[in-house]
Image (cartoon, rainbow, N blue to C red):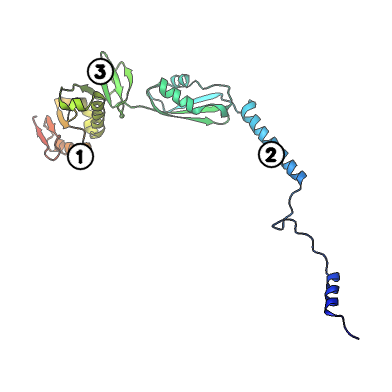
Amino acid sequence: MAGPTTAERGTGQQKDSPARPPRPGPEGRRLPSRSTLIVIGVLVLLLASGVAWALYGSSWLRAEQVRTTGVDVLTPAEVEAAAAVPIGAPLISVDTDAIADRLRQKLPRIDSVDVVRSWPHGIGLKVTERQPVLLVKKGAKFIEVDAKGVHFATVDKSPGRVPLLELKPDQSASLRRFDSDRLVREAVRVAGDLPGAVAKDTEVVRVTSYDSISLELTRGRTVIWGSGEGGPVKAKVLTALMKAAPKAGHFDVSAPTAPAASGS
């Protein structure tokens, strides 16, 4: 008896093999149902609403304390009064940039300030005060000048070991080119370049022109510095010159390649 034809064999195979289930998704994974997506969306919304309420509506995360660090001349009470932190406001809503701007405007002695939130209830004020490198005498008081040339405070007494700036510009071409603000910056530049031992002994920085700056030291000694250019080199030369002639009273490093010392 003849066997089944090829077509019949194919038909029989199709009847016997089980049907394959449809692929659930483009990557073979079953996609979540619409109801599942709705539940997830509701949960996310509730969570976001809870976080927003905790940050803005609850009494848990509110500004209740202010802590000031880094002050020396200023007091924490002065800084906190000028900061005017909105006590009781949600901590997340406190404008830290506005507080920093307020502090710099009201207290010029502040060079920089970092205003940070300290969860859950605090605001931190990390202050850096300006340091005087020169003093300008004004009547019986003194104006402090920092390393940037900023006149930032008027004080009744001279801080210890801060030299006095004498700005007495002559009527030269240099003065017409460089105004008094520029001359102050040059004096500050010189003060910052002085060797440590010389800086401690400097009582007066005198400026008569851009390229004519001199120093008065303790024990009646003087230094002709010249312009503010080449300060680090002049500082090294002056240190060596003072060691070589410790009893000299007059030093000239305006031309550091040809320094001179004289007097006793």
Q: CA distance from mark 1 to mark 3?
A: 30 Å
Q: Residue at x 44, y 19 (%)?
A: 78
216, above or below 245, in the image: above
Near mark 1 (Cα within 10 A), the count class, few <14, some 14-19 or many ≥20, is: few
Is 146 left or right of 230, judged from the image as shown?
right
Pick the residue in front: 246 or 259: 259
Residue 187: percent from left, percent from top: 23, 28
- The image quadrant of residue 194 is top left
Pick the residue in front: 200 or 237: 237
Amino acid type of the residue tagged 2 in the rendering: Val
Amino acid type of the residue tagged 3 in the rendering: Lys
Q: Is residue 129 visible?
A: yes
Q: Residue at x 72, y 38 (%)?
A: 42
Give the residue at mark 3. Answer: 137
Q: Which mark is residue 44?
A: 2
Q: Residue at x 86, y 76 (%)?
A: 8
Query: Looking at the image, do the residues carrying marks 1 and 2 touch, with CB atoms under 8 Å apart?
Result: no
